[in-house]
Image: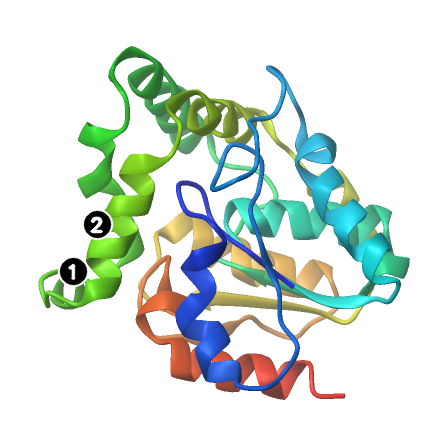
Amino acid sequence: MLLHPLGADRHFWDPVCHQLGSRPVEALDLPGHGSAPASAPGSGIAEYSAGVVERIERLGRPVHLVGLSLGGLVAQQLAATRPELLASTVLMGTVAAYPEPMRQMWRERAATARAGGLDTLIEPMVAMWFTEEFADSGDPRIAQARKTFGGTEPEGYARACDLLAEVDLRDQASSMRPPVFSVCGEDDAPPFREAAEWLAKVTGGDTALWLPGRHACALEHPEQFAALLTGLVAD
């Protein structure tokens, strides 16, 4: 089960799903993204996780849960509080808590979205997610990421930014039940790289696992990510 980052939807994972072939896989929309309604104002990570819990319970069996960024926060919450639902957890490009400069960035992005929509935030997203070479390549994945981000409902995006500015899961990190794998892009922003190593250590791993690329390395390199994922969750 795959959980997308902020400003995306379940189709973010389409290239990875294609690479996974016949393996059973499902991607979900998080609140305020894709077809999922926005969370209530002031919702915390438990509210963002509720739909994922409901879906896994309907499946009736534990899943290998993969979460990127915002999706990774949901995955951390479930690994700590509902481990019986999970066969394994892959935390990708995520943090347990953002440093204050990034908290302020999320506050500012929430205000921007509420004041005028997401258009001015599209290119900062591209720069954060992709290497410059890939962003300039004309690959249709870039155009799709821009389109999906720009089409995200502004208030739903802003409420997710509100969550990112406040969330702090550090106290429950050691409660996450293994197997937990921490994955990150080699050129992701420093807070994500630092968090990847910290999460690996606090959850009992020796080190984080690295892929080429930035924040959306799974989208830029779906073949490599699918191969890594298949190796981690082989059963």
Vertical placement of 85 versus 134: above or below? above
Q: Is residue 49 above or below residue 158?
A: below
Dot label at residue 135: 1
Which is more foreground, mark 1 or mark 2?
1
Mark 1 / mark 2, whichever is N-terminal: 2
Report the side of 228 relative to 63 (left or right). Answer: left
Q: From the viewer's perspective, tell me whether residue 148 is left or right of residue 18.
A: left
Circle number at residue 127: 2
Q: Position of residue 202 (x, y in %)?
A: 71, 58
| Secondary element at tag 2 | helix
235 on left or right of 165: right
Q: Of 226 and 35, which appears nearest the observer? A: 35
Label 1 environment density (alpha carbons within 10 Å; few <14, some 14–19, many ≥20)? some
Quadrant location of the C terminus?
Answer: bottom right
Give residue 42's quadrant in the image: top right
Identify the residue at image location x=51%, y=32%. Answer: 32
Q: CA distance from mark 1 to mark 2?
A: 8 Å
**Proximity of marks 1 and 2: CB atoms separated by less than 8 Å:** yes
Q: For the residue marked with disc 1, what is the amino acid?
A: Ala
Name the residue type under label 2. Ala
Q: Which residue: 29% across, 52% down?
A: 145
